[in-house]
Image (spheres, rainbow, N blue to C red):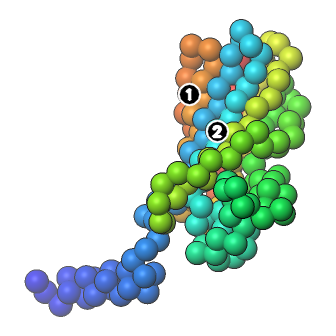
Amino acid sequence: MGGKGQFVIRVVLLSLIAEGGLAHPLRLSVSQIEYSSDTARMTVSLRLFLTDVNEALVFDPDNDELRLGREDEMPNAEALLIAYLNEFFYLKINENEVPIVVKSKDIGGTGQDTVLELLLEHSVTPPLRSLEIKNAVFTDLFFDQTNVVYIHRDDTSRSLMLNKKTPMSSLVF
């Protein structure tokens, strides 16, 4: 292997050492939005890497003092999270922005791959005519953040990839 190839390998290895080799490899969040005409309810599942949440809220990815989604969650943790989400995430249903109200939180995974799942629910006055989604979570922290949004409306599905350049999308039904 030539000098240039060895240099590239050294740079990659140094990067891994500098990062501790512990950071999760993806700058990604996944949202799933489901609407049922039968129940006139919209549920939103927002899955976020916990280290990214900690980075956004307390500026330290390894700081677990907020204890989000756990029985011993800090009293101000959800308020901090909602304040952050209000800046970077919203839904407009039939042109009306809906408030972010967390119905439940769940933690899954281990170590750097631990995920915080938030469940939001909203009643919708039928018919569902339009949906505007802004999901720019963590784009303030990571230039390569991608937020995947799956939308299921009765029997139809769509997917979106939102990021810093394209933080929102509108759908008309």
Q: Between disc 1 and disc 2, whose residue precedes?
A: 2
Q: Residue at point 25% right, 82% down?
A: 9
Measured along the vertical axis of the image, is residue 62 above or below residue 106? below
Disc 1 crowd rating (10 Å Cα; few below 14, some 14-19, many 20+) is: few
Please give the label number shown on residue 35: none
Q: Residue at point 89% right, 31% down?
A: 96
Q: Residue at point 55% right, 54% down?
A: 115
Figure disc tally = 2
Q: Residue at point 53% right, 51% down?
A: 108
Measured along the vertical axis of the image, is residue 80 above or below residue 99? below
The quadrant the C terminus occupies is: top right
The residue singled out by tag 1 in the image is: 158
| Residue 92 seen in this snapshot | yes
Identify which amino acid the numbered label 1 is placed on. Arg
Q: In the rendered image, which quarter is residue 125 located in?
A: top right
Identify which amino acid the numbered label 2 is placed on. Ser
